[in-house]
Image: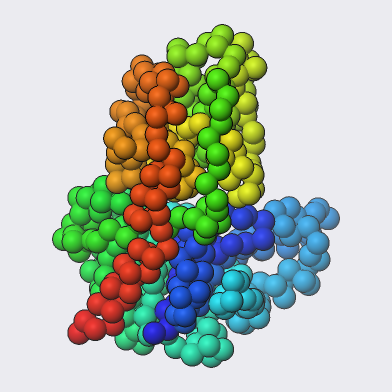
């Protein structure tokens, strides 16, 4: 079986080790199991309007910005011509973990907006799909991750070639009402034509059924898989320290709940220097959160670590006593299964995805944005983290979210996908 995976985000670009990471874990597991797999990666850079504006700025003696600084007038015009008439010039290929990844650096045909951005993305996707087939043969099926825009591309490919496709939905955009209403009919059609629909959590499946309707009803649950480095790693010895270290890992944006976490930590542990909170991540709230920590006088207890590598995150998890995910909404919660795979109990908000991961045997669930309840959970964990069986936590999470379960689930879905009329 030849599977072509299409992520909706750029797949593992050099400047971001996290973009497409969930799809990489799945593809690597499939390849190591002997399956034939390939990946399409679409990136849109520059727009027609942007390049034309750069030409005008150059003609007026200025220097265009946003990546066009090194282009002269003639080069800008040739760039625009090639992007429109010869987009295949911007296709490249590489091998990641043993399987092929074919990329295209496409062009926004219109000024980018949530309503029309998919048009240029799908146009570029069709071009790179043709190149993929030329180099590696046509796939038996397509696995699109997120309907917008990868599922929209899979729908167009299916219309042209008859190749069946499935969609795995990861996005919180449905719950947050961030997909333009004008785009929803097209999204619904793409869901309806998919042979199999999956979501990374049951809660997201319920959101899809509510927002899309019958076209997305009946989605199956195929959760994300543990990072192979976490699944194969040794179980670190629990700390014998009399203190307690809480760890939060996530982008520093309002949705992730770090404001509430700091307030809850303050209620529970202000002036208890043996209890610390370490927050890994970067984002728009970094300055605000740092100012908040300073104003509370908790600089000795709460640390903002910035953006960490995967290896650094793993080391932080090994060194902590409990991972906390206080998000307002999550479609899944990969950091939870990563921490559990290292034998660390967790605290998470009851906000969608965590409910399919966290239970009484491995951690605590609290209402989202409830500072008092979160402070109570932090206090309870401070006095009980040593009571959790690290070996049992690791065994359970590997059984539920490890590589073998993923392969079994995908094999069933793929067989159904290619066998349906």
From this viewpoint, which residue is outermost toward the top?
Answer: 271
Q: Position of residue 54 (x, y in %)?
A: 71, 59
Question: 220 or 102: nearer the eye?
Answer: 220
Q: Is residue 327 left or right of residue 321?
A: left
Q: Residue at x 50, y 21 (%)?
A: 262
Q: Position of residue 124 (x, y in %)?
A: 52, 73
Question: 245 or 251: nearer the eye?
Answer: 245
Q: Quadrant of residue 293?
A: top right
Q: Residue at x 81, y 66 (%)?
A: 72
Q: Residue at x 49, y 63 (%)?
A: 25
Q: Quadrant of residue 346?
A: top left
Q: How many marks?
A: 0
Where 379 sits versus 200, above or below? above
Q: Position of residue 396 (x, y in %)?
A: 36, 49
One can see residue 384 in this view:
yes
Q: Quadrant of the N terminus?
A: bottom left
Q: Is residue 276 left or right of residue 145?
A: right
Question: 195 or 309: nearer the eye?
Answer: 309
Question: 370 or 171: nearer the eye?
Answer: 370
Q: Residue at x 64, y 44 (%)?
A: 312
Where 97 sits versus 315, above or below? below
Q: Position of residue 268 (x, y in %)?
A: 45, 14
């Amino acid at each position: 079986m030849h599977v072509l995976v299409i992520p909706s985000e750029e797949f593992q670009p050099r400047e971001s080790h996290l973009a497409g990471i969930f799809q990489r874990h799945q593809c690597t597991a499939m390849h190591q199991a002997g399956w034939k797999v390939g990946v399409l990666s679409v990136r849109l850079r520059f727009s027609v309007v942007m390049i034309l504006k750069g030409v005008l700025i150059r003609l007026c003696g200025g220097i265009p910005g946003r990546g066009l600084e090194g282009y002269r007038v003639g080069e800008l015009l040739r760039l625009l011509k090639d992007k429109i008439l010869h987009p295949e010039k911007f296709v490249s290929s590489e091998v990641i973990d043993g399987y092929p990844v074919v990329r295209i650096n496409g062009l926004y045909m219109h000024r980018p907006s949530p309503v029309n951005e998919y048009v240029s993305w799908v146009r570029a996707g069709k071009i790179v799909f043709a190149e993929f087939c030329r180099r590696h043969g046509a796939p038996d099926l397509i696995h699109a991750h997120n309907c917008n825009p990868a599922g929209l591309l899979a729908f167009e490919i299916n219309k042209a070639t008859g190749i069946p496709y499935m969609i795995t939905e990861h996005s919180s955009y449905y719950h947050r009402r961030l997909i333009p209403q004008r785009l929803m009919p097209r999204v619904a059609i793409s869901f309806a034509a998919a042979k199999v629909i999956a979501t990374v959590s049951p809660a997201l499946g319920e959101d899809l059924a509510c927002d899309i309707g019958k076209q997305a009803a009946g989605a199956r649950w195929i959760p994300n898989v543990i990072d192979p480095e976490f699944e194969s790693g040794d179980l670190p010895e629990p700390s014998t320290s009399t203190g307690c270290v809480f760890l939060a890992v996530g982008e520093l944006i309002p949705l992730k709940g770090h404001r509430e976490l700091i307030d809850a930590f303050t209620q529970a542990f202000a002036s208890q220097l043996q209890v610390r909170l370490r927050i890994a991540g970067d984002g728009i709230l970094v300055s605000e959160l740092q100012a908040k920590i300073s104003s509370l006088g908790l600089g000795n207890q709460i640390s903002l670590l910035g953006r960490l590598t995967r290896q650094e995150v793993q080391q932080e998890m090994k060194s902590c006593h409990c991972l906390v995910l206080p998000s307002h909404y999550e479609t899944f919660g990969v950091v939870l299964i990563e921490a559990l795979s290292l034998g660390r109990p967790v605290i998470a908000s009851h906000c969608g995805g965590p409910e399919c991961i966290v239970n009484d045997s491995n951690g605590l669930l609290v209402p989202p944005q409830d500072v008092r309840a979160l402070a109570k959970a932090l206090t309870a964990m401070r006095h009980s983290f040593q009571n959790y069986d690290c070996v049992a936590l690791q065994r359970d999470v590997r059984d539920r979210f490890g590589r073998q379960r993923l392969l079994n689930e995908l094999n069933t879905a793929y067989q159904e996908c290619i066998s349906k009329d």
